[in-house]
Amino acid sequence: MSASPIRFALHGGAGVIDRTSLDAEREADCHWQLRNIAEQAHQALLAGTSALDVVQRAVEALEDCPWFNAGHGSVLNADGVPELDAALMDGRDRRCGAVAALRGQRHPIRVARAVLDDGQHVLLAGDGAARFAIEQGLTAIDDATLITAERHAQWQRASASGRVSLDHDVAIESSDRCGTVGAVARDLHGHLAAATSTGGMTNKRPGRVGDTPLIGSGTWADDRTVCVSTTGTGEHFIRAQVAFLVHARMCFDGCTLATAATAALDEVAQLGGCGGLIAIAHDGQLVLPFNTPGMYRAWIDADGRVDTAIYAC
Ligand code: ASP
C-alpha cells in the first residue's frame, strides 16, 4: 500500500518562549488548541478537501483564538489599534491573495482568500483592503472587538518604554501570549498550499507591513517544490526573502527541503533576525525549524498522528 500523500503543519509564532512564561494549565491548553485544529485539518484532508481550503480554515480557527497574534487577540500598533496582515497561496498555479494593514475584519485570511478568488490583484492594503472586503460581502467589525485586555496592557507597557517587539518575546516582554499563525498542507492529490496571518509587532508604526503578507517573504506555495509559512522578526524575513529562498534553493540548487530551510533561517540570523518556519515539500517531507527558544507548532507525522510542541527540546 502506498503512503498517504497527506501532510499538514501549523505554527502559532516563534520567539523567546521559555518554560517559566507558561503555567502548566496554559501550556496544556495551548497543546490542546494546536492539536484540535491540526486534527480538524487532518480530517478535512482525508475527506478530500483541498490544501488551499484546509490552510485557510486552520488559520481562521487560530484567528478566532484570543491567545494568538492574529484576528481576535492581535497585538496593537503605536496608535493602540490592531492592523492586520495575512496571505495565502495555492501551489497548483501560484495564485495568491494578501492583505496588509487591514482594519475592521475579524478574519484577515478570509479577505486574502477573496483577493485570490477575485484574481485581479495580489495584495490590497489599508482602507482599500477594508473596502474590498465589504464589497465581497465580508462583515465589517469594530476594531475594539479584536482587542483583549492582555493585549491592551502589553501595548501600554511597550508604548511606555518605546519598544517594538515580537509579541510573546519574554526576553523583553513578560507574556503568556502566542504569536503569528500559519499553516501548510499537502492534500490527497499532492497539491500544496500555505497561509499566514498576524497582527505584526507590538507597538509597530501605523502602516508598517511585515513579512506575512508579502508573497515570497512570509508565505509561498509551489507544487513543484514547497509550501512555506514563516514567523519571526519580519523585516529580516523580508530582507532574506525567506519563503521564496527555500523554494529557490530547492528549485535551482537541487537542495533538500531540510538544507534549504536551514540555509534560509541562517540568512535571517546573519542579518540579525530570528524566527522559524513550517514547510512541506512536493514529495511530502516536512520541516519545522526555528532559531528561537520556542515555536508553537503542530504537525501530522507520516503515520497520520498529530504531534504538538512548544520548546526547542
Ligand atoms: N513576522 C511577523 C511580523 O513581523 C511577526 C511574528 O511572526 O511574530 O509581522
Image (cartoon, helix red, strand yellow):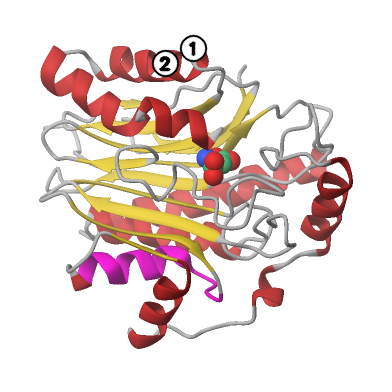
Q: Is residue 97 above or below residue 274?
A: below
Q: Position of residue 234 (x, y in %)?
A: 51, 37
Contact (CB < 8 A) between labels 1 and 2?
Answer: yes
Report whether residue 306 is seen: no
Secondary structure of the magenta portion, mostly? Answer: helix
Q: Which residue is mark 1?
A: 270
Amino acid type for the residue under numbered disc 2: Glu
Q: Is residue 145 above or below residue 17?
A: below
**Mark 2 neighbour class, 10 Å CA radius: few under 14, some 14 to 19, many 20 or more:** some
Q: Residue at x 86, y 54 (%)?
A: 156
Indicate the quadrant of ligand 1 in the picture.
top right
- Residue 2 is drawn in which quadrant? top left
Magenta-drawn stretch contains 113: yes
Which stretch appears magenta? 104-117
Q: Position of residue 260 (x, y in %)?
A: 29, 17
**In this picture, residue 181 sits left or right of residue 74:** left
The kind of secondary structure element at disc 1 is helix
Q: Which residue is mark 2?
A: 267
Query: Quarter of the image containing the N terminus?
Result: top left
